[in-house]
Image (cartoon, coloured by chain):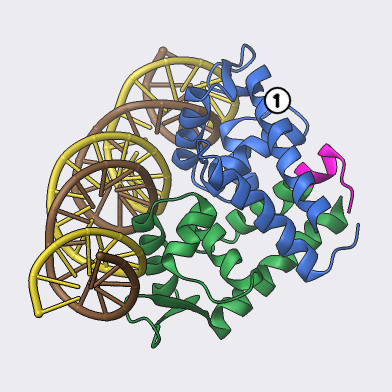
Chain colours: A green, B blue, C yellow, D brown
DNA sequence: GATATTCGGAACGGATACGAAACAATTTTG
DNA sequence: CAAAATTGTTTCGTATCCGTTCCGAATATC
């Protein structure tokens, strides 16, 4: 898909402004990066894998997961194969959240 | 422009992940909403106008402008007509910033 | 089996953000 | 011109986030 710079920014503005207006719990850029990666990239996801893939420190990923878990958007599950690891899993609530967020983007793209 | 939910989320993820990877100064959702509104919506822009339009308190807008000014992405200019008001103006640095950000989005859309 | 390595998380200190209330400066209203 | 209203900012207390460093548990290596 090809976008012009104006289209790109209008989409971004439309979605982010609407999300700000709604006063929804705002996730930081890192949290959003973690969340979308968990949902859109193939499993499994580990803290280390996310940290490397996002070029972010492990503690930063841990804290992002703390927040996302607290909101019920992802879930930690100990890896039975290697009990040092934690697998990050999707949740129904997270799917709903992202589906609604996608709606914002779609609307913003329509308006453009 | 019509997007599918998956396209929408892939674009968002691609752009935000790349921006996180680059460790660029991350703006909060509010700051980004203020910045894009100032650049994409017709002037003039005032604190009050932005607060109303974004459904956010005035102090929140003031603080967002503090941050954006500090980064040189916008500039405050006293309104000569009504000296209670402050007009928010664009800067070269802000234009460059948004142009580069648009590039991230465009790349993410291509990759999809 | 003792030592290293790897994993996720905790602890600490600093930076930044927030909402609500109070504020100074200016303009409008009576 | 005095009182009220409007505009943007400051202040205060609180919450969140970040990077760095360190730690305990589990696994791999020798």
**Element at badge 1?**
helix
What secondary structure characterizes most of the magenta part?
helix
Instruction: State the residue in front, A39 or A20.
Output: A39
**In what quadrant of the picture does the N terminus of chain A appear?**
bottom right
Above or below — where is B20 with respect to D28?
above
Q: Which residue is mark 1?
A: B95
Residue D19's x, y, as percent? 34, 42
Compared across the picture, whether A87 is left or right of A106 comes to: left
Q: Residue extending furthest bottom?
A: A80
Q: Quadrant of residue A60?
A: bottom left
Instruction: State the residue in front, B88 or A53.
Output: A53
Residue B54's x, y, as percent? 61, 48
Instruction: State the residue in front, C22 or A7.
Output: A7
At x 68%, y 18%, the residue is B92
Q: Is residue A2 magenta?
A: yes
Residue B29's x, y, as percent? 55, 48
- Chain letter of the residue carrying label 1: B
At x 54%, y 56%, the residue is A53
Compared across the picture, whether A52 is left or right of A109 comes to: left
Above or below — where is A92 with respect to B83?
below
The magenta-colored residue range is A1-10
Compared across the picture, whether A59 is left or right of A49 comes to: left
Residue C23's x, y, as percent? 29, 28
Q: Is residue B9 magenta?
A: no
Q: Is residue B91 visible?
A: no
Compared across the picture, whether B14 is left or right of A73 comes to: right
At x 67%, y 72%, the residue is A100
At x 72%, y 67%, the residue is A102
Instruction: State the residue in front, A96 or A111.
Output: A96
């Amino acid at each position: 898909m090809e976008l012009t710079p104006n289209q790109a920014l209008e989409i971004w503005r439309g979605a982010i402004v609407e999300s700000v207006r709604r006063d929804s719990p705002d996730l930081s850029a890192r949290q959003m990066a973690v969340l979308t990666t968990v949902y859109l990239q193939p499993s499994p996801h580990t803290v280390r894998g996310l940290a490397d893939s996002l070029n972010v420190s492990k503690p930063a990923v841990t804290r992002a997961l703390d927040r996302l878990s607290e909101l019920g958007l992802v879930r930690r599950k100990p890896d039975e194969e290697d009990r040092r690891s934690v697998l990050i899993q999707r949740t129904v609530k997270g799917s709903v959240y992202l589906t609604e967020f996608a709606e914002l983007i779609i609307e913003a793209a329509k308006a453009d």
